[in-house]
Image (cartoon, rainbow, N blue to C red):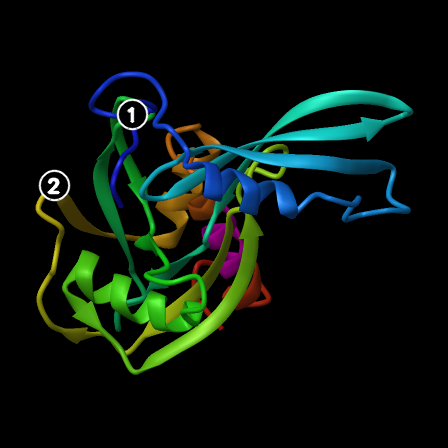
């Protein structure tokens, strides 16, 4: 997934064509959410990048006009891959926003807003881990940053993994590691895994599939 540094190569925010502004303003000629506690009066596109669109919303909240930031994301899919031995494949990669390496489940954005998320999950599993599967099961959905971004991720469990090959982007460096579930849980409790989708996936998987006696054997 490409990183965005907040600026264009020429400096500052890129100019938005007048036609695009008119199109974005037409979205808010009348309040879209009348009857809600907050009424949106206007939405203007301020920046469009490779992954995100950043808007300024004008709203009425508690009878007061306010200006809120809103970020649109087309959506993504993530996968929790489980080996025949019950280990979970994780990816370690550098994240520019945090300026450090993170341990995460494989994930990636949709190629198109209408792409089925399970198809994205199949693709990202093979691209990032070098394994593919014909056994993908829905686990949960998460909204990653509800205060100002609409990014939504569907998370799947992949089993019966078939060795294949990684297909990384030119700017991607990803190491694949196999972990026991209990060790990943401990890293969450120690604050060593902080990625939201990864925490949600691991905890949901553990709760759904762990045996009734709560030992590390899976049901």
Q: Which mark is residue 171?
A: 2
Q: Secondary structure at mark 2?
A: loop
Q: In screen coordinates, is 1 left or right of 184?
A: left
- Is residue 213 in view? yes
Q: Where are the magenta residues, as a range? A: 200-206
Magenta stretch encompasses residue 125: no
Q: Secondary structure at mark 1?
A: loop
- Is residue 150 in view? no
Q: Residues within 10 Å of mark 1 (few under 14, many from 20)?
A: few
Measured Cα–Cα span from mark 2 to mark 1: 14 Å
Q: Which residue is mark 1?
A: 5
Residue 51: x %, y % from top left: 36, 44
| Residue at x 76% of width, y 30% of height | 59
Mark closer to the chain start, 2 or 1: 1
Residue 68: x %, y % from top left: 65, 26
Dividing the picture into quarters, in which one does residue 120 lie? Answer: bottom left
Relative vertical location of residue 62 with respect to residue 166 in this rendering, above or below: above
Of residues 209 and 42, the one nearer the viewer is: 42
Magenta stretch encompasses residue 201: yes
Residue 23: x %, y % from top left: 55, 47
| Residue at x 42% of width, y 47% of height | 198
| Residue at x 45% of width, y 75% of height | 137
Q: Is the stretch drawn in magenta largely helix, strand or loop?
A: helix
**Residue at the far front in the pictured view:** 18
Dividing the picture into quarters, in which one does residue 133 lie? Answer: bottom left
Pointers 2 and 1 in contact (C-beta within 8 Å): no
């Amino acid at each position: 997934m490409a990183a965005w540094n907040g600026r264009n190569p020429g400096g500052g925010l890129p100019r938005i064509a007048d036609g695009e502004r008119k199109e974005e303003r037409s979205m808010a000629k009348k309040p879209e959410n009348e009857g809600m506690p907050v009424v949106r009066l206007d939405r203007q596109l301020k920046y469009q990048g490779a992954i995100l669109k950043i808007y300024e919303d004008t709203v009425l909240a508690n009878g007061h006009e306010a200006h809120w930031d809103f970020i649109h994301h087309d959506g993504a899919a993530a996968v929790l891959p489980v080996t025949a031995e019950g280990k979970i494949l994780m990816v370690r990669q550098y994240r520019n926003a945090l300026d450090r390496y993170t341990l995460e489940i494989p994930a990636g954005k949709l190629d198109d807003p209408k792409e089925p998320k399970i198809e994205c999950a199949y693709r990202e599993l093979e691209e990032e881990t070098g394994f593919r599967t014909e056994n993908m099961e829905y686990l949960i959905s998460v909204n990653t940053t509800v205060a100002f971004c609409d990014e939504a991720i569907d998370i799947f469990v992949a089993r019966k993994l078939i060795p294949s090959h990684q297909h990384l982007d030119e700017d991607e460096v990803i190491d694949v590691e196999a972990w026991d579930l209990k060790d990943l849980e401990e890293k969450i409790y120690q604050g060593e895994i902080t990625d939201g989708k990864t925490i949600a996936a691991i905890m949901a998987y553990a709760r759904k599939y762990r045996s009734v006696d709560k030992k590390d054997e899976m049901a």
